[in-house]
Image (cartoon, rainbow, N blue to C red):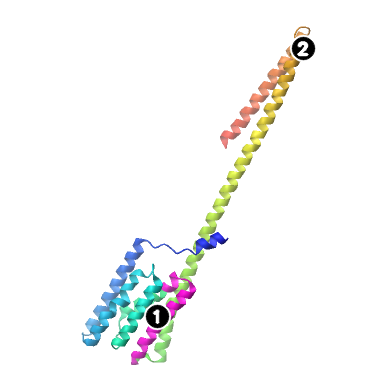
């Protein structure tokens, strides 16, 4: 059980395809942010905002291999934006922060996931403080529902993934044990057949030796007794051959 648990806790490998998908998604979110901000017209504030936009979106390309570092960088860039200029409505960045929050919950242990959530929450709160329109109770609940929901969804996904991996490991263990028991049963059956073959051959050889000695004793004075002894020898030999053929047939079937 300890081995199964250890295997279930191993980091889930990330293939190149998800990395390419995450990188493409990060670029798309950055493009959405740039288009949305540029559509409202560029000034000094929006230009400073866009300078930091790559720090909020592009780290998502590493959200599976380094989820905690990703959420820290995203939160740091979001906080920096709120310090250098008034927050601007950017749907691409909103999705980026939510995805970073989800990723740290889905791909890290509980303590790290909580720290990641605090980093994201602090950055969102800092941006809300700088935005007068976001200080209402509705906006506060709005942030908790969206970002807290993303974090909880990540935890649910992680728990389900770990449960599936535990079941797979347990299935492999049971399969291995079943194969081991099957091999042990075959080995025990072979030992039983070997013992039986030894007993049959030893018995028949004993009969042959005894009857051969008897035939030698009565060879000159009792031809009929000699013939009986020879018949017993032949019968014992036939029995031995028949039993050997049967046991060898059993071995070939296995």
Give the answer, above or below, for where 242 lies relative to 163.
above
Q: Image quarter for residue 41?
A: bottom left
Q: Is residue 131 visible?
A: yes
Quarter occupied by the C terminus: top right
Q: CA distance from mark 1 to mark 2?
A: 106 Å
What residue sits right under mark 1 in the picture?
120
SS at mark 1 in the image: helix
Few, some or many residues within 10 Å of mark 1 (<14, 14–19, 20+): many
Q: Residue at x 36, y 80 (%)?
A: 75
- Measured as percent of width and height from the top left, residue 119 is found at 41, 80
Rendered image: mark on residue 37: none
First reached walking from the N terminus: tag 1 or tag 2: 1
What residue sits right under mark 2 in the picture?
217
- Measured as percent of width and height from the top left, residue 4 is found at 54, 60
Q: Residue at x 64, y 26 (%)?
A: 242
Please provide the residue range marked out in magenta: 103-132
């Amino acid at each position: 059980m300890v081995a199964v648990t250890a295997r279930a806790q191993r980091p889930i490998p990330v293939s190149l395809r998800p990395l390419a998908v995450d990188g493409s998604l990060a670029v798309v979110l950055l493009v959405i942010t740039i288009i949305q901000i540029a559509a409202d017209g560029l000034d000094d504030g929006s230009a400073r905002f866009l300078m930091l936009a790559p720090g909020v979106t592009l780290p998502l390309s590493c959200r599976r291999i380094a989820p905690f570092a990703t959420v820290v960088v995203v939160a740091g860039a979001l906080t920096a934006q709120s310090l250098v200029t008034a927050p601007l409505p950017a749907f691409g960045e909103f999705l980026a922060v939510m995805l970073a929050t989800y990723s740290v919950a889905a791909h890290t242990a509980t303590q790290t996931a909580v720290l990641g959530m605090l980093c994201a929450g602090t950055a969102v709160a800092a941006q809300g403080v700088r935005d007068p329109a976001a200080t209402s109770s509705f906006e506060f609940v709005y942030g908790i529902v969206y970002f807290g929901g993303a974090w909880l969804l990540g935890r649910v996904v992680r728990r389900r993934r770990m449960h599936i991996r535990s079941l797979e490991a347990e299935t492999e263990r049971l399969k291995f044990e079943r194969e081991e028991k099957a091999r042990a049963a075959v080995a025990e059956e072979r030992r039983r057949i070997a013992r039986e073959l030894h007993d049959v051959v030893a018995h028949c050889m004993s009969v042959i030796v005894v009857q051969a000695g008897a035939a030698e004793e009565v060879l000159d004075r009792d031809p009929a007794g000699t013939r009986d002894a020879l018949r017993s020898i032949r019968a014992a030999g036939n029995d031995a051959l028949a039993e050997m053929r049967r046991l060898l047939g059993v071995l070939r079937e296995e």
